[in-house]
Amino acid sequence: MYFTIENPDVKMIEQLNIAKDAADKANKAKTEFLSNMSHEIRTPLNAIVGFSECMLSSKDLNETKEFAKDVVDASQNLLEIVNGILDISKIEANKMEIIPKEYNPREVFNSLVKLVQPRISEKPIELKVNISPDLPGILKGDMSKVKQIILNLLTNAAKYTDKGSIEFIVNCINRSNTNTCILNIAIKDTGRGIKEKDINKLFSKFERIDEDKNTTIEGTGLGLAITKSLTEMMGGKITVQSKFEEGSVFRVTLEQEIISMEIPEGNTEEIEIDYNRHPGKRILIVDDSKINLKVANQILKPYNFNVKLVESGFEALEIMESQTFDLILMDIMMPKMNGVETLRRLKNIDGFDIPVVALTADAIEGKEEQYLQAGFDDYLSKPIDKNQLDRVLNKFLGGNDNV
C-alpha cells in the first residue's frame, strides 16, 4: 500500500512522465509549426525573388509592370502570414487589447468587398452583398478587429469556392434602450464545404482540413483560430454550418455601441492623394537599413520634397547642427542609438521644434501608444501605407505655403 499510494518516488516518476508527454507534444507542435511556416513563408518569397529577377532582365515595359504586380500580390500575402503569426502570439500572451473607436460600418463593409473582389475575379463566382437598410450610420467598437474578422471569413470563402456564389449578409438588431446594435454577419458560399467530422477542428491553430486536397491553397491554418479568438474577446459568437462539397455558412454576432443612426455623407475611404500640396518641404529620414531608406525615398518622390537620408541617430544629430527640416521620419530599432534615444537627444537641442514621426516595423498592438508616450508626434508602421503617410504629411506640413 505504501508503495502504490504513499511512495513519493512513484509520484515523482508519474509527474515526470506527464511532463515528458507534454514536452513531446509541445516539440511536435513546434516542429509542425516551423515546417508549415517554412512552406508558407517561402512560397510568397519565391514569387517575390523570382519575379524581381524577371523584372531585372525584362526589356518589355508591360511585362515588367505585370511582374511588379505579381511582386506586390506576393508581398501582401507574406504580410498577411506574418500578421497572423503576430496576432496569435499576442492573443496567447494576453497582449491583444480591445480599442473602441467610432466608424462608419457601411464604409468599412464596402471596403472589405473591394479587397476580396480581386481574389475571385478570375473565377466564375458572383459576389452578393446584402446590408440591412436599418444599419446605424455610426457605430463604436474595435473597427480593426471587426474588419479582420470579416476579411478572414471572406478570404476563406474566396479561397475554397471555385464556382457559384459568395454572399456577404449584414443584419442588425438596434436596441434603443441600451443604445446598442447587435450585428448579425453571415458569409455564405457554394464552395468545397467541410466534412462533419472536421468541423470541430476548424477553429484550432495550424489545422488545415483535407490538406492533401488543398495543397494549392495558401494559408497558415491560423485565420479561423484568430477569428474565433477576436470574436470572443469582443463578447461575440461565431458558428458554422457546412455540407461537404456543397458549401458553408459562417455566422458572427457582435454587439457595438450606436453613436448615430444617420448615414454620413461622402466616402472618406476613397481620398485621392494630392502630391502637389506641399512641394519643396525638407524631410529627414533616419533608418539604419539602406533598402528601407530607398523605399521611403521612392514613396516620397511624387511629392517633390527635398529629402535627406541618414543611416543612424548619430548622423541625424550631426546634420541638425547645420541644417533644418520640416519633418523627421525616424526608425526605432537602430544599433548603438535607437530612435527613442535619438529623439530624446534631439529634444535637448535648444529651440528644437521639428515634428518627429516614428517609422517602424515594430507594429505590434499597443506600440503606437508607447511611442506617442515616448514623445513622438505620430506613428507610421512598415510596410508604409500611402494613405497613412499622406495623412501624416498633411497633418504636419500644411498646404502649399512654399509655392
Image (tube, rainbow, N blue to C red):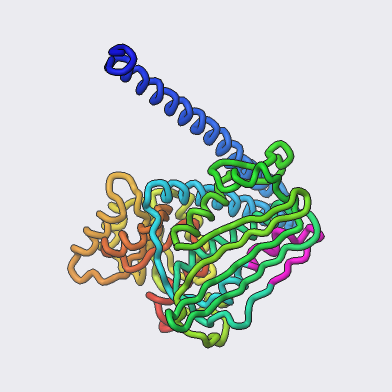
Question: What residue do we see at 78% from left, 58% from top?
Answer: 122
The residue at the point 67 percent across, 55 percent down is 241
Q: Is residue 296 above or below residue 20?
A: below
Image position of 31 (left or right of 55): left
| 140 to 123, vertically: above or below | below
Question: Residue 7: x and y, percent?
Answer: 28, 15
Using the image, determine if residue 234 lies above or below residue 2: below
Could you say which is closer to the camera, residue 34 or residue 310? 34
Q: Residue at x 51, y 52 (%)?
A: 226
* Coordinates of residue 250 in the picture (x, y in percent): 63, 59
**Residue shown at 55%/39% (left/top)?**
37
Magenta-drawn segment: 113-129
Quarter of the view holding residue 363: bottom left
Q: Is residue 56 magenta?
A: no
| Placement of the C terminus among the 4 image quadrants | bottom left
* Front residue (pair 107, 190): 190
